[in-house]
Amino acid sequence: MTLFRNVVFIAAIAGLVAGVALACMQAYATVPLILKAEVYEQAGGGHDHAAAPATPAENAAGMTAMSSAAPAPAEAMAPAEDEGWAPADGFERFGFSVVANIVTGIGFALVLVAVSEFAGGIGNWRQGLFWGLAGFAAFTLAPGLGLPPELPAMPAADLVQRQLWWWATVVATAAGLGLIVFRRSLPLVALAVALIVAPHIVGAPQPDSFETAIPEGLHHQFVVAVTLTNLVFWLVLGAVVGVVRGRFTGTATSLRDSFA
Amino acid sequence: MNTASVSLGASASSQSRLMQLALAAFLGIFVMGFVGFSHIDAVHNAAHDYRHSMGFPCH
């Protein structure tokens, strides 16, 4: 299991660095927009949660304020106290965001390192940048085309269906990019293009109504902020993997022999 | 794209290599799935801003 341990080690360092960087960028770029959107959300009668069952009595309280925002069908309105524990606003909430960033940063890094090892590994920071671009395309760009980053209180289709589409798009896009880069045959490239395009022909699950209290300008700003912060995250992740991996392989014939 | 001249754990057999890399990838997917896609309310609330900021499907 030495290889596994080395992959985890590299992923942990890269995920930590990129996760901290992403958390810092989010604190300035995306979180303020989320907080702004929550003002509209609260004006609209509380936290929307499609998975929560609607309780008519409690809905009534939010209805007067909701009249300005068209209610999206299938979206049940649930009062905040029904949603279980939540971190307190301010430092605690930010702290949990940082932890989530680091933990999933390591998760993304594990996938990136494992997949890149099949293709020979990320040898240096420049190769890492290209792997990072591929990760950005697969995990942010492609799913973001069909399901643009949403702000709280925005109408959306069923959560499970969106999550399924999200994962299917990530897998298809990653497979397509892999075929384009690593296979030198025209039919396979055609298959790759088909794989990348297919999820968007099938189409992402969309809400019945797009009406929302969130101003379009705010949402547009948010989409740009999410896309750019994720681009930097992936570039940092790929580059750090390249640097760390390069440092430990050094001139040894294999990483396993050099530091395991 | 050039591939690295050195590979991680080259002395491992190819089958063991495949297993270990697959295990690492699945661990990564599990971690992302738990933090970013779990339907448990407490997990959702803790990582709420993160999920929105990543463009993960939320709510």
Image (cartoon, rainbow, N blue to C red):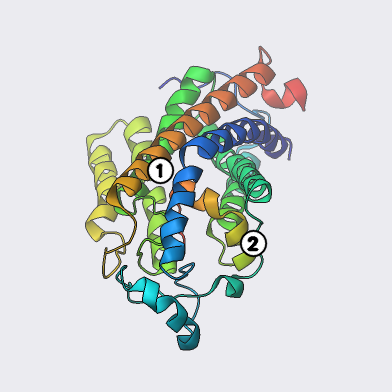
Q: CA distance from mark 2 to mark 1?
A: 26 Å
What chain letter is assigned to the residue under label 1? A
| Residue A79 against residue A203 in the figure, above or below | below
Q: Quadrant of the N terminus of chain A?
A: top right
Q: Quadrant of residue A207?
A: bottom left
CB under 8 Å between discs 2 and 1: no
Q: In the rendered view, would you say A111 is above or below A75?
A: above
The extreme front residue here reads A64
Give the residue pinned by disc 2.
Answer: A86
* Residue B33: percent from left, percent from top: 56, 56
- Mark identifier at residue A92: none
Spot occupied by residue B20 in the image (x, y as percentages of width and height): 65, 43
Question: Residue drawn at (30%, 69%), measured in percent from left and top?
Answer: A68
Image quarter of residue A124: top right
Picture residue at 62% right of the left edge, 34% below the top: A20
Residue at 29% over, 54% down? A199
